[in-house]
Image (spheres, rainbow, N blue to C red):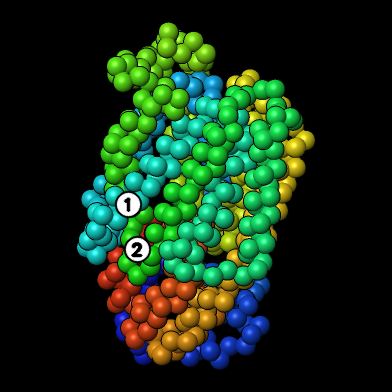
């Protein structure tokens, strides 16, 4: 994800031209450095009078706005149309929605992976050498997460799904997982933020717990379905922590990860999801009717007519809702990577947080829901406010923890390599920060930062450029900034 710097030795500051540029840059004043534009030659100061509108509008800034907008819109669409697919269009067929959408995901990610392997050299031999056990573990955890959400979804109103979705609930679960698995410690501020989030979850569940204040619209299931939906995010939390430990010092390519993990996810869906679908009271199929049930689901989707096994389905909306969910899921995955590439991990957290309230209110829009709206209730709005405040508090103190292990601090401590370069220069800062922020952003809710400094020390000290080109697959001087794929982590 980081731009390449070209060939040369990193231990002594690179080629003579680069050492000269570094020397010139180190002698510029602080005010001169402030005027260095994003496209400036390394160590060369641009005339402030020629910057003009570029001071306020840049290509990078416009790309960040594009990816952030796409991430928000697709994130809301993913939450909205998953709930409508399960609660309105095909409430009796969660397993069919589960494996059908997974096949579409696999087809898309496989095509993307094939494109990178056939037409680029970005996926290096070291990336292809990743153990399939790691991909299988990620696919297994993703499938378990999906099973909890999809089987519980038909029984939970959309607004509750937005409030108790992974964006919010994964924060305390990541904290627990990283404490148990990585021995991570947290500040009092982070723990207070999680306490507020837990309080918001209780407020969101009060209508089900007390039987009062429930919305008159949307499905009304047992409180156990809400708990399954909420706890269903725990596999995602363990997956984020597992990814951090598994890939802390091993570069990977996101297209490679998405394709192989989705294949193992699909295998797990049939191995684990099919038996779940025939459990009385949990799934919707009897063992003897399993295949006919899947056939009815296909007819509902393909013809728009309600089969006898689901008179309450609105099959006329099945195609539009299921395909909109599928499209938004794929776009969300790639848009989040774009936000990290052109912004930073903190900004990606803000984008993810904004999705929760927008998704909540989207369920009251007749235009977005096809007329299947849910009325707003005051207690649900209170829960929304408490949950968002809790996430913001946690993120505020989490950013402070990130700053303690910032890339700047890590690089400045190195004996050679970047330690001999001027970190204020555009090339050095862009290269180090984009690689670092891709590491922060790989798991949406990064649990621990302590391995990052060690990763930088091993990667950048004593000749960073050959290591970057060998392990991350950069192609040379022509691949500065724009030409490096944001799929590369």
Kindly state the secondary structure of the residue where label 2 is placed.
helix
Q: Which mark is residue 137?
A: 1
Q: Position of residue 173 (x, y in %)?
A: 52, 54
Is residue 18 positioned above or below 176 on the image? below
Marks 2 and 1: in contact by CB < 8 Å?
yes
Whether residue 117 can be seen here: yes
Between residues 354 and 188, which one lies in front from this camera angle? Answer: 188
Mark 1 neighbour density, 10 Å: few (under 14) some (14–19) many (20 or more): some
**Which residue is at 58% across, 29% downward?**
222
**Which residue is at 31% across, 20% downward?**
287
Give the residue at mark 2.
246
Whether residue 13 can be seen here: no
Is residue 250 positioned above or below 142 on the image? below
Between residues 327 and 440, which one lies in front from this camera angle? Answer: 440
Q: Position of residue 168 (x, y in %)?
A: 59, 49
- Left or right: 371 with respect to 279? right
């Amino acid at each position: 994800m980081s731009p390449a710097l070209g060939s040369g030795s990193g231990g002594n500051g690179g080629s003579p031209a680069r050492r000269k540029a570094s020397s010139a840059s180190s002698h510029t004043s602080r005010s001169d450095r402030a005027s260095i534009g994003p496209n400036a030659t390394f160590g060369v100061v641009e005339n402030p009078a020629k910057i003009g509108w570029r001071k306020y509008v840049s290509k990078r800034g416009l790309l960040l706005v594009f990816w952030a907008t796409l991430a928000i819109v697709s994130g809301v669409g993913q939450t909205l149309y998953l709930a409508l697919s399960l609660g309105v269009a095909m409430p009796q067929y969660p397993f069919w929605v589960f494996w059908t959408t997974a096949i579409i995901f696999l087809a898309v990610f496989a095509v993307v992976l094939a494109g990178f392997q056939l037409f680029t050299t970005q996926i290096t031999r070291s990336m292809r050498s990743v153990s399939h056990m790691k991909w299988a573990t990620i696919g297994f955890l993703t499938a378990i997460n999906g099973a909890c959400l999809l089987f519980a979804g038909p029984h939970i109103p959309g607004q509750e799904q937005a409030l108790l979705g992974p964006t919010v609930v994964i924060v305390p679960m990541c904290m627990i997982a990283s404490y148990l698995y990585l021995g991570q410690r947290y500040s009092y501020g982070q723990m207070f933020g999680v306490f507020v989030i837990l309080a918001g979850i209780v407020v969101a569940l009060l209508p089900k717990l007390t039987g009062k204040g429930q919305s008159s619209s949307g499905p009304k299931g047992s409180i156990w379905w809400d708990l399954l939906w909420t706890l269903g995010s725990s596999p995602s939390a363990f997956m984020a922590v597992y990814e951090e430990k598994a890939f802390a010092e091993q570069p990977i390519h996101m297209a490679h990860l998405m394709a192989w993990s989705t294949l193992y996810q699909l295998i797990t869906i049939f191995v684990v999801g099919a038996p779940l679908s025939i459990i009385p009271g949990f799934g919707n199929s009897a063992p003897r009717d399993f295949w006919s049930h899947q056939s009815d689901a296909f007819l509902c989707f393909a013809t728009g007519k309600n089969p006898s096994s689901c008179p309450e389905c609105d099959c006329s909306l099945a195609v539009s809702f299921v395909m909109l969910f599928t499209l938004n899921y794929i776009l969300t995955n790639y848009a989040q990577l774009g936000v990290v590439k052109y912004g930073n991990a903190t900004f990606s957290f803000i984008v993810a947080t904004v999705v929760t309230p927008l998704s909540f209110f989207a369920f009251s829009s007749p235009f977005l829901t096809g007329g299947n709206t849910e009325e707003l209730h005051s207690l649900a709005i209170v829960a929304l406010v408490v949950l968002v405040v809790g996430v913001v508090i946690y993120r505020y103190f989490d950013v402070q923890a990130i700053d303690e292990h910032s890339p700047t601090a890590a690089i400045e401590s190195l004996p050679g390599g970047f330690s001999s370069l001027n970190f204020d220069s555009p090339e050095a800062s862009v290269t180090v920060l984009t690689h670092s922020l891709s590491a922060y952003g790989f798991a949406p809710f990064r649990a621990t930062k302590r391995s990052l400094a060690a990763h930088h020390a091993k990667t950048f000290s004593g000749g960073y450029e050959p290591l970057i080109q060998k392990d991350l697959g950069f192609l040379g001087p022509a691949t500065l900034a724009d030409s490096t794929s944001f799929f590369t982590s």
